[in-house]
């Protein structure tokens, strides 16, 4: 990838998550969850700088301990996007990437694809990720956000409820990271919460309802977001299997 814009990556890290307080400090195979996200962001070729924006000193200390950069933000900020904007206003960056601290399996190349998508679609104000899935339990799970988009990849709607599926029950699962044009981020944060946003409890619907174009980039592999404590074991199982597979490949073993 050739860098054509200065890109700032920010990981908003709020302590008191409603469903799972302090989840981003939860250890996963000996490392705090937030460190996995930070390492993926640092490995991305497109990000010129990576910062954790937090409202709690324990998260700040944790990030500093593993060598990351962190900035304290006011606890009264209403959303992750506002936390991102608070940090971005004092930093350089034509594109601002809002990463999620609860996506420990996010791949660096997905971040690059997200940024490339925004660069390649100049009429869109922001871009986000999705993956095609075929899983009836996920389809009805409100923690699994679904997205539908038009033939050009422009988002039409996001929902926690089951949305229209495609052939054989397949649907597109939203992966909630975003790349914003700098001016679009600040514009978004100045908008009042929209009725759809309040109903669905999905921030991105504010952008859609106010006429902002969201370009969807479809990636080829799912991630495992940590929404509730039970999700931690799913991530650990995945990482253990991945390490086992790598070990077999390095020794020439076959299953």
Image: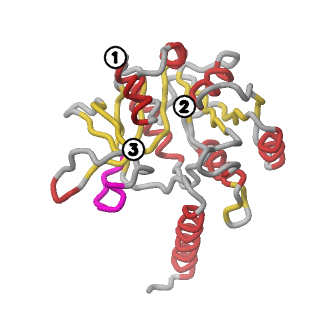
Where in the figure is residue 42, as x and y percent of width and height? 64, 42
Looking at the image, residue 118 lies above or below residue 255? above
- What residue appears at the point 50 percent right and 85 percent down from the top-left corner? 253
Residue 166 in the figure: left or right of residue 128: left
Residue 5 in the figure: left or right of residue 42: left
| Magenta stretch bounds | 130-140
Circle 2 Cα neighbour tier, 10 Å, few/some/many (<14 / 14–19 / ≥20): many
For marks 2 and 1, give the CA distance: 20 Å
- What residue appears at the point 47 percent right and 30 percent down from the top-left corner? 203
Q: Quick check: is 138 in the magenta stretch?
A: yes
- Mark whose residue sits in front, 3 or 2: 3
On residue 211, the disc is 1
Circle 1 Cα neighbour tier, 10 Å, few/some/many (<14 / 14–19 / ≥20): few
- Mark whose residue sits in front, 2 or 1: 1
Mark 3 lies on residue: 174
- What residue appears at the point 52 percent right and 50 percent down from the top-left corner? 106
* Label 3 secondary element: strand
* Label 2 secondary element: strand
Q: Badges 3 and 1: C-beta atoms under 8 Å apart? A: no
Residue 235 in the figure: left or right of residue 16: left
Q: Which colour scheme is used?
A: secondary structure
Residue 250 in the figure: left or right of residue 133: right
For marks 3 and 2, give the CA distance: 16 Å
User: Toward the viewer: 30 or 195?
Assistant: 195
User: Toward the viewer: 218 or 25?
Assistant: 25
Mark 2 lies on residue: 97
**Of pointers 3 and 2, the one earlier in the residue sequence:** 2
């Amino acid at each position: 990838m050739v860098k054509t814009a200065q890109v700032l990556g920010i990981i908003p890290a709020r302590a008191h998550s409603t469903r799972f307080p302090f989840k981003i400090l939860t250890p996963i195979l000996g490392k705090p969850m937030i460190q996995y996200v930070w390492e993926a962001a640092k490995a991305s070729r497109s990000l010129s700088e990576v910062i954790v924006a937090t409202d709690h000193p324990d998260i700040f200390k944790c990030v500093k301990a593993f060598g990351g950069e962190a900035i304290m933000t006011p606890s009264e900020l209403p959303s992750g996007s506002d936390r991102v904007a608070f940090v971005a206003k004092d930093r350089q960056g034509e594109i601002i990437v809002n990463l999620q601290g609860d996506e420990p399996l996010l791949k660096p190349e997905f971040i690059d694809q997200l940024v490339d998508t925004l660069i390649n679609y100049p009429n869109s104000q922001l871009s986000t990720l999705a993956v095609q899935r075929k899983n009836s339990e996920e389809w009805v799970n409100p923690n699994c956000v679904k997205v539908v988009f038009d033939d050009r990849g422009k988002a039409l709607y996001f929902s926690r409820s089951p949305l229209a599926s495609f052939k054989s029950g397949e649907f597109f699962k939203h992966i909630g990271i975003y790349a914003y044009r700098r001016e679009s981020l600040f514009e978004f944060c100045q908008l009042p919460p929209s009725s759809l946003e309040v109903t669905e409890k999905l921030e991105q619907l504010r952008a859609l309802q106010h006429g902002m174009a969201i370009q969807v980039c479809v990636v080829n592999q799912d991630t495992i977001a940590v929404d509730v404590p039970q999700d931690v074991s799913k991530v650990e199982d995945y990482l253990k299997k991945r390490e086992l597979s790598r070990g077999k490949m390095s020794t020439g073993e076959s299953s």
